[in-house]
Image: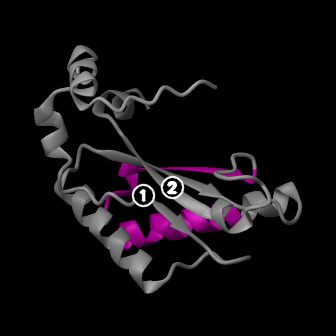
Amino acid sequence: MTTLVLDNPEMLARAALASGFLAGQHHQEAGRPHRTRFHYGFNKHTLDTTDTEILKQHALYLKNHPGIRVKIHGHSDNFGSGDYNRFVARQRANAVARLLTQEGVSPSALLLTTWGSDRPLARPEDHAANRRVELEYLSMEIAQAL
């Protein structure tokens, strides 16, 4: 995969406008919490108090924007069998979905996917970085297609 890094803000702005970026759409997401990745301890599927509070902020945002959907991606490290890693990843994603629905988010706004250890964030040896749940906000077009 090739990554292009642009450090010229003016060039970035022109490229964003050329690709169809609208500043009004960006402003609409201004109230959305920026943190969308939550990490777990070994063999755990519960979050600490700080992570729970951030997820509650996501719940508030989703309740205030009922047309938005979020995909919850559950991941694990590569300890254990593939079946067990998918099981732990599913527990993590389900725990996040449960918290969001307890906070009033409609279950229809949530999509769950679990990857086990198939999609590491870091090198497989970086176990702690790979034990995570990620929230992916879906654009209206993608949400309608799903």
The residue lying toward the viewer, choosing from 59 and 4, is 4
Quadrant of the snapshot with the C terminus: top left
In x, y percent, where is residue 76? 70, 61
Left or right of 105 on screen, residue 131:
right
Quadrant of the snapshot with the N terminus: top right
For residue 36, which numbered disc appears in the image?
1
The type of residue carrying mark 2 is: Glu
Residue under numbered circle 2: 134
Given the current orientation, which residue lies at the most extreme top position?
18
**Relative to residue 146, is residue 41 depicted above or below?**
below
The stretch of residues the image draws in magenta is 88-117
Left or right of 93 on screen, residue 56:
left
Crowd rating for badge 1 (residues with CA inside 10 Å; few <14, some 14–19, many 20+)? some
Given the current orientation, which residue lies at the most extreme right position?
81
Splitting the image into 4 quarters, where does residue 94 fall? bottom right
Q: Secondary structure at mark 2?
A: strand
- Residue at 28% of width from left, 68% of height from top? 57
Left or right of 129 on screen, residue 12:
left
Counting every numbered tag in the picture gives 2
Snapshot colouring: one colour
Asked if disc 2 and disc 1 are in contact, CB closer than 8 Å, the reply is: yes
Q: Secondary structure at mark 1?
A: loop
* Main SS category, magenta section: helix
The type of residue carrying mark 1 is: Thr
